[in-house]
Amino acid sequence: MANTTEYMLQTESVIKQYRQSDSVITAVNRVNIKIEKGEFVAIIGSSGSGKSTFLHICAGLDRANAGRIIIDGQEITKMGADQLGRFRGEKMGFIYQKHHLIPQFTALENILLPTVMCNKSDSSYQESLRELVECLGLSERLHHLPSELSGGQCQRVAIARALINNPQILFADEPTGNLDRTNADEVLRLLLKIRETRGQTLMMVTHDLDIAAKADRIFRMDNGILSLDRDYLGGNKKTIVSY
Ligand SMILES: Nc1ncnc2c1ncn2[C@@H]1O[C@H](COP(=O)(O)OP(=O)(O)O)[C@@H](O)[C@H]1O
Ligand SMILES: [Mg+2]
């Protein structure tokens, strides 16, 4: 079993509830997970089961009502907004189902946004930019606006934006859910190739079992409760007993 410093992400009894007039929805119900550095974890589960909520909370995009979230040894649930913002910019990347690119910005400007937010010097990201643009096949598209790009190209720009600061952990919420099969397969292939090169930890929500099968471990979210998906244990590449 890995010791604490080897975990990229640990959650302890994380709870998230939404209150609606007279009812309470427990979207995330006491979730514990430990993800090792460099691990690829997939989360599957039916619509409305709490996958997106959990991913957003782990990535510091939303706050839990209770519980602890520790990323690379640092408890983000204790951080104030400014500190968390900086920490996210340095450590984490997030890819949404929809690309969420800024429509008035070119592809290049969108990709470089996290470097601006983190006050990075030009020289610090040039290598990362060159590598991402080449790998994602974006060199001919850098000065186009999102409206001038295809869905697959927009998602490749979103991947480059998520990775430009070379974050240690990447969160992806159904990152190819909006694409047709051919584009989805290609975007996913590129994403996994980059991750392989950079050794990033990846936590991905997907409804696609072929994609999930590529993960080291598969978890299933069911009504806010996360558990290891034992049906798929046999397909795992690594044997990890930290859960
Ligand atoms: N902002 C919100 N306000 C109220 N309820 C929400 C909100 N976001 C999500 N929920 C509810 O929380 C549950 C989990 O949603 P979600 O995390 O989006 O599930 P999934 O990603 O697995 O489809 C659902 O019942 C959903 O309706
Ligand atoms: Mg979702």
Image (cartoon, rainbow, N blue to C red):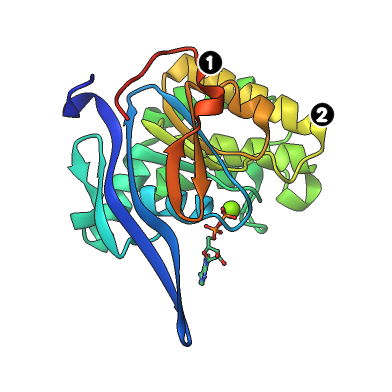
Compare residues 136 and 84 and report the one nearer the observer: 84
The percent coordinates of residue 45 (x first, y second) are 58, 45
Along the line of sight, which residue is nearer the eye, 242 or 168?
A: 242
Circle 2 sits in a helix, a strand or a loop, which is it? Answer: helix
Single out the residue that lies furthest toward the bottom.
21
* Residue pictured at 40% horizontal, 68% vertical: 17
Residue 223, position in %: x, y? 51, 55
Q: Which residue is mark 2?
A: 182
Residue 192 image-quadrant placement: top right
Q: Is residue 181 among the parts visible in the rendering?
A: yes
Quick check: 218 left or right of 200? right
Q: Quick one: 204 or 123, which is closer to the camera?
A: 204
Q: Which mark is residue 234?
A: 1
Residue drawn at x 52%, y 52% is 52
Instruction: Tell me the mark number nearer the camera, choosing from 1 and 2.
Output: 1
100 with respect to 184 (left or right): left
Q: Are marks 1 and 2 in contact (CB under 8 Å)?
A: no
Q: Secondary structure at mark 1?
A: helix
Which residue occupies the extreme front position in the image? 231
In the depicted structure, whether residue 142 falls above or below residue 68? above
Which is more N-terminal, label 2 or label 1?
2
Could you tell me how far apart the alpha carbons at marks 1 and 2 are, in whole angstroms? 27 Å
Query: Residue 180: where, in percent of width, then height?
Result: 82, 38
Q: Amino acid at mark 1?
A: Gly
Q: How many marks?
A: 2
Instruction: Kindly identify the residue that appears in the image at 61 percent across and 39 percent down.
Output: 206
Question: Which quarter of the rendering shows the C terminus?
Answer: top left
Q: Alpha-carbon neighbours of circle 1 within 10 Å: few (<14), some, or many (≥20)?
A: few
Quadrant of the image containing the N terminus:
top left
Which circle marks residue 226 in the picture? none
Q: Three-letter amino acid code at disc 2?
A: Thr
